[in-house]
Amino acid sequence: MKTLLVTGATAGFGAAIVERFVGNGWRAVATGRRQDRLDALAERLGRDRVHTACFDIRDADAMAAALDAIPAPFRDVDLLVNNAGLALGTAPAPACDLAQWRQMIDTNVTALVAITHRLLPVLIERRGAIVNIGSIAGVYPYAGGNVYGATKAFVEQFSLNLRSDLHGTGVRVSVIEPGLAETEFTLVRTGWDQAASDTLYAGAQPITAADIAESTWWIANLPPHLNINRLEVMPVSQSLAGLQIHRAP
Ligand code: NDP
Ligand code: 8X3
């Protein structure tokens, strides 16, 4: 039986990825800050198949302690899904809160790098795989995307560079870059403004968490000689709108 570790498994993509893999014969280590959500997931899918590790991924000591405490056989990680992440705010840069910028960098970049570094030895030993969750925001700029988009550009480039460094190890590295997807993402971004979230997704038939779980499953179960480098996924309702020009009055 194979094992995956999913960061940010209390909601959205992460929870759906755990469900998809455990429902199809894998065991999972599910992480996040909300113990009640992790417990509910483990109760639903079975404690023998889901090990929960509750910690703030920005806290290096808490992360190390939680990873040290993972029991056998959950320690034998074949797939790391770096999914925990967030956007905070949609304001233009001059109006942004620096603390929110730091939180996005600490979560989406620094913590992702730290847990990857920590798990590389077991992933190499097991000829495993890494799936990083980037975003279209890391490829295409938009007003209000500022630091969030920049963190996701890091995730893309880190993924591609990791592939180069892992050359010859058999470890596969992929980055999935979703567009508009309805999860708790916009609630978090807007300070739990349900109306703002509902308005954004209304009539758009956005990507679902299950869709990204399916993409992750596909990548992980391809023949071992194939590597998906980048997978960009958008709902049909979303497309790119091009450049803007500010004209002198
Ligand atoms: P959700 O808000 O539904 O889920 C985010 C997950 O990240 C939660 O499980 C949350 O757990 C976890 N998380 C956030 N901060 C921390 C932290 N400090 N420590 C530990 N866990 C943390 O959003 P999504 O499922 O949509 O987002 C998952 C990933 O997908 C993110 O990286 C996001 O940037 C990316 N993405 C999302 C898109 C979208 O439109 N939804 C599109 C493209 C990419 P908890 O709060 O319990 O700690
Ligand atoms: C989330 C997608 O377009 O809201 O990463 O930034 S977007």
Image (cartoon, helix red, strand yellow):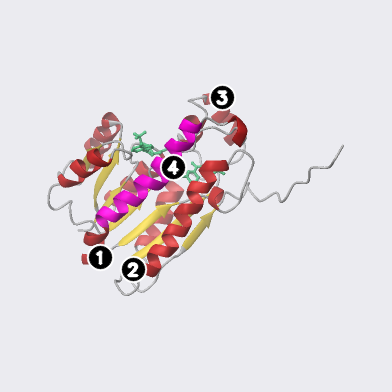
Which amino acid, mark 1?
Answer: Ile
Q: Are marks 4 and 1 in contact (CB under 8 Å)?
A: no
Report the span colored magenta: 98-119
Front of the two marks 2 and 3: 2
Q: Circle 4 sits on which residue? A: 105
Q: Closer to the N terminus: mark 2 or mark 3?
A: 2
- Local crowd at mark 1 within 10 Å, few (<14), some, or many (≥20)? some
In the rendering, at what x and y percent does residue 228 appear? Answer: 44, 65
Q: Is residue 189 visible?
A: yes
Query: The residue tagged with tag 4: helix, strand or loop?
Result: helix
**Could you give the CA–CA distance between mark 1 and mark 3, rounded to whole angstroms?**
45 Å
Mark 2: which secondary structure?
loop
**Of pointers 2 and 1, the one earlier in the residue sequence:** 1
Disc 4 packing (10 Å; few <14; some 14–19; many ≥20): many
Depth check: give the residue in front, 18 or 57: 57
Q: Which residue is mark 3?
A: 195
* Residue 78 sits in quarter: bottom left
Which circle, 4 or 1, is nearer the viewer?
A: 4
Q: Is residue 126 magenta?
A: no
In the image, residue 198 sits, relative to residue 146, either above or below, namely above
